[in-house]
Image (cartoon, grey):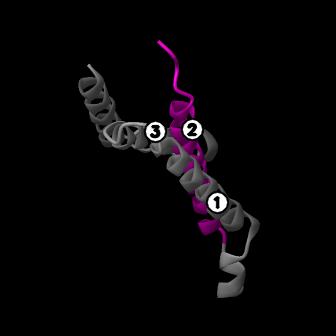
Amino acid sequence: MRFDYHYLFLAASVTLASFSQILLKKGAMKGYASLLRQYLNPWVICGYGLLFVSLFLTNCALRTLDYLNAPVAESLGFVLVPALSAVLFGERLTWQKSVGIGCIVAGMIIFYV
């Protein structure tokens, strides 16, 4: 059985998209003097750059992978973003978020088993 490297593309895509959302949130947390500076700051530019790379990797991965795997792998982003927010921003993981994350992980396990 040969490992398909396109799964790595999909995993990298989800991870980069999650970091992209964190960077965009970081950029939105600051106040800016003008609307132009609000959208042309390093956090937002890097966030959109990572999002573009993520879209490119997703496109590369879906060229050969089964389309049924993509939504399940993409749902991993809903687990990564709250985890990264807790680590980087000190946000609390409420019980509602924890239950939601548990449901997402359970759904992923049920799909693959």
Left-right relation of 108 to 35: left
Q: Secondary structure at mark 1?
A: helix
Distance of mark 1 from mark 3, alpha carbons? Answer: 27 Å
Amino acid marked by disc 3? Thr
User: Helix, strand, or loop for circle 3?
Assistant: loop
Circle 3 packing at 10 Å, graded few (<14), some (14-19), many (20+), is few
Magenta range is: 1-30
Quadrant of the frame with the C terminus:
top left
Q: Which residue is mark 3?
A: 64
Q: Amino acid at mark 1?
A: Gly
What is the spatial separation of the Cα atoms under label 2 and label 1, in whole angstroms?
Answer: 18 Å
Badge 2 or badge 1: first in the primary sequence: 2
**Which residue corresponds to the image point at 65% horizontal and 65% vertical from the top-left?**
27
Q: Earlier in the sequence, mark 1 or mark 3?
A: 1
Which residue is depicted at the point 29% across and 24% down? 112
Q: Which mark is residue 47?
A: 1
Provide the residue designation for mark 2: 9
